[in-house]
Image (cartoon, rainbow, N blue to C red):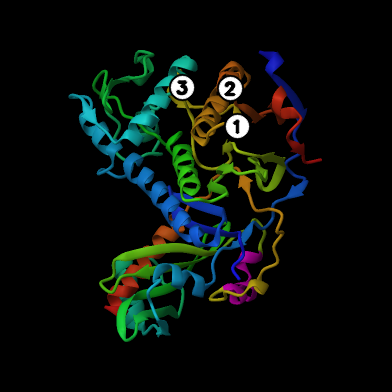
Amino acid sequence: MRPASASARRARPLLGTFVEIAAWGPPGVLDGAIDAAFAAVAQVHGLMSFHEPSSDLGRVNREASRGAVTVHPWTSAVLRAALDLHRVSEGLFDITVAPVLQRLGHLPGRAPGGHPAEAPRDAGFELLGADRLRFRRPGVRIDLGGIAKGFAVDRALDVLRDHGAKRGLINAGGDLAVFGAAGERVWLRDPRRPAASLGHVTIRNEAIASSGGGRALVVDPRRAAPSLGIRGATVLAPSCLLADALTKLVRIAGEAAGPVLERYGASALFLSAGGLVHVTRDWSTRVRRAS
Amino acid sequence: MKRHWVTWAAPPAIVVSIAVPAHATQYLTVEQAQKLAFPAATRFAEAHVVFKPADVAEIERRSGEKVRTRGQQVWRALVEDRLVGFFIVDYVIGKHLVIDYGVALEPDGRVRMVEILEYRESYGGEINSASWLGQFVGKTSHDALQVDRDIRNISGATLSSHHVTEGIRRVLAFYETCLR
């Protein structure tokens, strides 16, 4: 007799990292659910990769200075979220810092000319409805590296749920979301020493993301330069898109990100250069510290 | 702003307070991955290839990647006697990673599926140990690795998958050189 419930855990190289998908539920649905969830992640990658000229984003960066460009509804949803985050964070969350990353050699291609430090503090692009957008001026370039991975995790989790899984987990290189009655314990890597942990936290029907410790830079749009004061940040949020995006904000703004976190129902931990761990009050009772 | 935050001193970086020493997971056995890739196949015929020196040179030329093995583990996926694809097991070693992965190819060499079979992260020295590697390479059994089962989910510095991307490039050059 087949068991009423089973589990499966698989991983594929996607989004430049390792995407792990675990699902629990009726044995007959798990393989198909996980296949479809991987396909959703691959689709987000295909739409929003800065590196692929054929992606939605590649087309936007080539054409949106000259006129309106129509994008996939998923790309449009990510751009709308980015616009909202830009407004609420008063410009600190900014997806148009791609030219800075290009100049630093962290994104391919030559940066357009101009002086980004003197650019106006608007979002650099506008949404026109019906999944169309245009850039506000020449020289704008978008990189969704700080938000698309979280969105991909959210979509993959939706797919698991839609395919009948009772519980699911997606972990895209540390951007992680879960659904179901059971909580998942997540260990937080110490950004100074990846073999050690700062502690662990148990998450349930929510998402967690971390930034720092690796090679990835976060650009402070006020200075058009890398933000170096904070060694690493972890954010808990209702969606992985928010968790992913807000880690960048916390690394730029530190404690000043507090009101924005609160507005999105998120909480955070970050490690300052001086070696202090800062946690939002609502999270201080949840994280189990390494002693 | 202060009301939002509390602070504590981080554990000193030099002390491994809670170690995350070896985040390792076996996801699929070779057999499980073969069935996922080719559900209609009635059997998988072993067709392991031992490289001739000319093969190594050709694979390196086509892929731009160094060949570090003496051969490649390959199975032909068959429906009765009809070839429906290839299943290749390969591994890559990064600075902190050892990964066993499977690549399923269509008969014409297009990639059908890539799945991680086994993933091991390590910040210790054991990756460089030849005997340890010897245990690992090509193995699919559960007993080769001692794993802390509790540490399954880690949030933190993202580990790049570019070694696997390079490995797949080498596997495709192997197909062109030895299987086509």
SS type, badge 3: helix
SS type, badge 2: helix
Q: Quadrant of residue A274?
A: top right
Q: Which subunit holds the residue at mark 1?
A: A
Residue A235 is tagged as 1
In the shown orientation, is residue B69 left or right of residue B150?
left
Question: Vertically, is A200 above or below B72?
Answer: above
In the shown orientation, is residue A65 left or right of residue B64?
left
Mark 2 nearby-residue class (10 Å; few <14, some 14–19, many ≥20) = many
Residue A85 is tagged as 3
Residue that numbered label 2 is attached to? A261
Circle 2/circle 1 CB separation < 8 Å: yes
Residue range of the region highlighted in magenta in the rendering = B126-136
Circle 1/circle 3 CB separation < 8 Å: no
Q: Position of residue A201 (x, y in %)?
A: 70, 39
How far apart marks 1 and 3 lie (CA) works out to 15 Å
How far apart marks 2 and 1 lie (CA) works out to 9 Å
Instruction: Work out whether mark 3 precedes mark 2 in sequence or the reverse, and give the earlier one.
Output: 3
